[in-house]
């Protein structure tokens, strides 16, 4: 029997999903702004669930499977990708520093770029093929489709469209393993993020802050940075929102079509994330994407915790020999390797690559 928790450090909320012998016992979410202001809230919640065999912690861009005791400044940089000269508030650092003080058995997990099941040629000059939380959504997708159709993991095949409050991602799964990914900073626009950035815009900006990556999306195009996805869904028929709506929808269509090169005959196109729960968004995507494959929302097994937290819980369970060990082993989570910088071929990144070179 195993008792574990998976954590999803989302843009809007930190979600917590707990499994006890495969059955859910924790299903909670805390606003991210509350946790960044008071990281001890995470400790209180985890202590209330003790004893725990393992926790999958907030992993950012990801690392090959790493225990919290192994986290140092280099690994923290690779997880967060915050420049040393940046004055930005590193929320992940605050949370990790609090977690390291406790005797929790916490693991940090890979992003899509680290996965050995993704061919190296698809990784060239990329970092964000899907952060660790997006990988968790893909793990849940494999679990979900296998259960939904009563099929083996090697029969699972889908293109995942993950739409979070901040960023989107599109991940390709073939024969039950992740084979490609388009992360939130390489994808079309997200609800907050501008997605893939025109190189000339990057040049004009001169120096880009992390906050820039969280701007330019649906809310900004609509001219209302405080609008929620639910409110946007209610106003889509207003001409003031047409531009944001069309740019958002077509961006996802193009991303799924592109992923069709890597997963040519997906059994399904799976939708996950906060935005797919907005009826108008789900209905429109179902209609548009139906030409590319059958569309279905991931069922999941929690009511509050988002898909990423559920996937993280499955990974934690599998790592400790629980019911999902076969799933974690089959997807080769433990065989992830390298760093997010390994596949970049720019002269300006050479020194950084050498400094943070993996010892694997």
Image: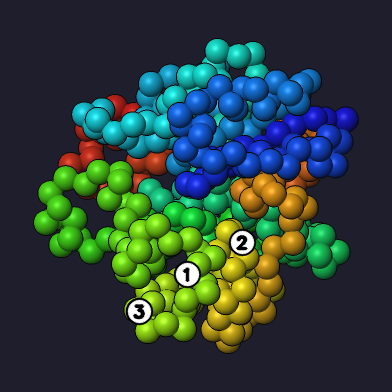
Q: Quadrant of residue 43?
A: top right
Q: Secondary structure at mark 2?
A: strand
Of callouts 3 and 1, the N-terminal one = 1
- Res 154 → quadrant: bottom right
Relative depth, front residue between 190 and 270 = 190
For residue 351, side relative to residue 268 (left or right): left
- From what the image shows, is residue 317 above or below residue 130? above
Q: CA distance from mark 3 to mark 2?
A: 27 Å
Question: Is residue 261 in sight in this rendering?
Answer: no
Asked whether, in this view, residue 203 is left or right of residue 225, the answer is left
Question: N-terminal of the two: label 1 or label 2?
Answer: 1
Residue 109 screen position, x and y as percent = 57, 36
The residue labelled by disc 2 is 272
Rendered location of residue 55, percent (x, y)? 67, 29
Residue that appears at 35% across and 37% down: 81
Near-viewer residue (53 or 124): 53
Image quarter of the N terminus: top right
Label 1: which secondary element:
helix
Q: Residue at x 78, y 20 (%)?
A: 51
Helix, strand or loop at mark 3: helix
Q: Which residue is mark 3?
A: 240
**How many residues crowd mark 2 within 10 Å: few (<14), some (14–19), many (20+)?**
many
Pick whichever of labels 3 and 2 is earlier in the sequence.
3
- Which quadrant holds residue 157? bottom right
Residue at left offset 47%, top offset 38%? 33
Camera-nearest label, 3 or 2: 3
Expressed as whole percent of the image width and height from the top left, the position of residue 319 reads 72, 33
Mark 3–mark 1 CB contact (< 8 Å): no
* Residue neighbourhood size for the residue with mark 1, other residues' Cα within 10 Å, grouped as few (<14), some (14–19), many (≥20): many
How far is disc 3 from disc 1 in space, using C-alphas? 11 Å
């Amino acid at each position: 029997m195993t008792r574990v928790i998976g954590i999803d450090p989302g843009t809007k909320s930190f979600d917590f999903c707990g499994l006890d012998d495969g059955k859910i016992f924790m299903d909670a979410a805390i606003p991210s702004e509350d946790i960044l202001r008071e990281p001890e809230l995470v400790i209180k919640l985890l202590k209330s669930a003790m004893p725990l065999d393992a926790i999958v912690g907030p992993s950012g861009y990801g690392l090959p499977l790493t225990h919290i005791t192994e986290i140092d400044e280099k690994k923290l940089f690779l997880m967060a990708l915050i420049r040393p000269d940046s004055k930005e508030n590193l929320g992940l650092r605050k949370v990790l520093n609090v977690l390291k003080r406790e005797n929790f058995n916490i693991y940090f997990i890979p992003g899509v770029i680290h996965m050995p099941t993704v061919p190296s040629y698809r990784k060239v000059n990329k970092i964000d093929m899907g952060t660790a939380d997006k990988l968790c959504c893909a793990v849940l997708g494999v679990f979900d489709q296998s259960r939904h159709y009563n099929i083996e993991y090697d029969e699972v095949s889908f293109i995942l469209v993950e739409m979070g409050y901040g960023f989107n991602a599109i991940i390709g799964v073939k024969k039950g393993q992740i084979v490609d990914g388009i992360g939130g900073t390489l994808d079309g626009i997200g609800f907050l993020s501008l997605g893939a950035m025109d190189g000339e815009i990057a040049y004009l900006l001169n120096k880009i802050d992390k906050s820039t990556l969280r701007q330019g999306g649906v809310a900004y195009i609509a001219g209302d940075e405080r609008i929620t996805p639910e409110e946007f869904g209610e106003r889509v028929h207003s001409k003031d929102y047409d531009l944001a709506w069309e740019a958002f929808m077509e961006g996802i269509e193009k991303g799924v079509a592109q992923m069709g090169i890597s997963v040519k005959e997906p059994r399904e196109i799976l939708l996950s994330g906060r935005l797919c729960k907005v009826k108008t968004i789900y209905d429109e995507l179902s209609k548009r994407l139906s030409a590319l494959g059958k569309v279905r929302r991931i069922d999941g097994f929690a009511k509050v915790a988002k898909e990423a937290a559920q996937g993280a819980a499955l990974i934690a369970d599998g790592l400790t020999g629980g019911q999902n060990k076969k799933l974690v082993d089959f997807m080769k989570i433990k065989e992830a390797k390298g760093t997010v910088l390994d596949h970049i071929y720019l002269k300006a990144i050479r020194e950084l690559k050498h400094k943070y070179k993996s010892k694997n």
